[in-house]
């Protein structure tokens, strides 16, 4: 089974014409999962209670975080999975806080050189006008847990919240006006879409990941 985890706070949403309105991170993770040809499971952290790391080191004895939230269940699913596809968006020039909190909690797995995620197959989805900080942080945390080098990375521009807030057409602080100028109304053709190149890359990453998982069975 391949586990997909989206750290985006937004779920994928389409309009009546089927155009993606928001949720590019979820969209691409699900696309990769489906194209692997393997059984898969998807988890959106937007629906979970993920608290931040506290630095209490109560996990030092048994490598199990004592915070009572949804993180432990997802951790166990990561243990069981043949591979993990993790995705997150760039907010304010860095990985979003939900993705940061989730990954930061993997510190609980590092004590006494146990590294239960060591060698875990993975792929990364990074979304934003500049996805590099997301990819860099995810790679760093995966590497700190001695997970395998990513099979591949899928990047996409994503869709700014400004297109959905209700005021974007005449807000000079937002990306709608910065991109299109002032508008009377945001039409469907104004909405940025996930680039075709992102789907092409997702196809490649998914095929590669699926083949590796099958070879390891």
Image: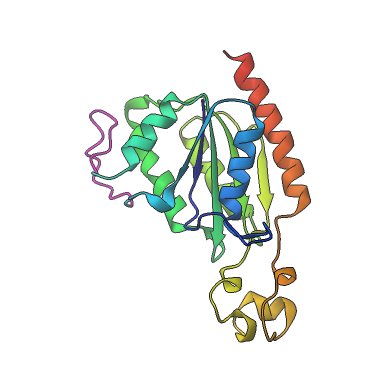
Q: How many marks?
A: 0
Depth check: give the residue in front, 124 or 1: 1
Residue 78's spot in the image, x, y percent? 44, 31
11 up-or-down from 199: above or below: below
Residue drawn where x is 69% and y is 35% of the image: 205
Residue 27's spot in the image, x, y percent? 60, 48
Depth check: give the residue in front, 164 or 173: 164
> Would residue 15 be found to the left or right of residue 110 on screen?
right
Check residue 184 for magenta coloring.
no
158 up-or-down from 143: above or below: below
Residue drawn where x is 68% and y is 86% of the image: 184
Check residue 54 for magenta coloring.
yes
Quadrant assignment for the C terminus: top right
Residue 145's spot in the image, x, y percent? 46, 33
Magenta: predominant secondary structure element? loop
Residue drawn where x is 69% and y is 68% of the image: 191
Depth check: give the residue in front, 40 or 120: 40
103 up-or-down from 120: above or below: below
Determine the image quadrant of residue 122: top right
Residue drawn where x is 56% and y is 82% of the image: 167
Magenta segment: 52-67
99 up-or-down from 34: above or below: below
User: Colour mode?
Assistant: rainbow
> Would residue 180 be found to the left or right of residue 34 on screen?
right
Residue 21's spot in the image, x, y percent? 62, 62
């Amino acid at each position: 089974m391949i586990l997909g985890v989206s750290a985006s706070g937004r779920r994928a949403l389409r309009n009546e014409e089927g155009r993606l309105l928001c949720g590019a991170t979820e969209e691409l993770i699900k696309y990769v999962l489906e194209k692997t040809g393997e059984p898969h499971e998807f988890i959106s952290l937007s629906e979970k209670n993920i608290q931040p790391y506290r630095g209490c080191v109560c996990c030092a004895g048994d490598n199990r975080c004592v915070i009572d939230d949804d993180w432990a269940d997802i951790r166990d699913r990561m243990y069981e999975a043949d591979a993990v596809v993790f995705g997150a968006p760039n907010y304010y020039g860095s990985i979003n806080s939900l993705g940061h909190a989730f990954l930061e909690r993997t510190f609980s797995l590092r004590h006494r050189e146990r590294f239960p995620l060591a060698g875990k197959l993975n792929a990364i989805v990074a979304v934003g006008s500049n996805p590099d900080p997301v990819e860099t942080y995810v790679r760093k945390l995966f590497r700190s847990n001695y997970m395998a080098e990513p099979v591949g990375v899928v990047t996409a521009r994503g869709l700014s919240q400004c297109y959905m807030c209700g005021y974007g057409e005449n807000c000079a602080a937002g990306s709608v006006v910065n991109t299109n100028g002032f508008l009377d109304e945001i039409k469907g053709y104004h909405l940025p879409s996930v680039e075709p190149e992102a789907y092409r890359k997702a196809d490649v990453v998914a095929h590669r990941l699926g083949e590796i998982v099958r070879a390891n069975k």
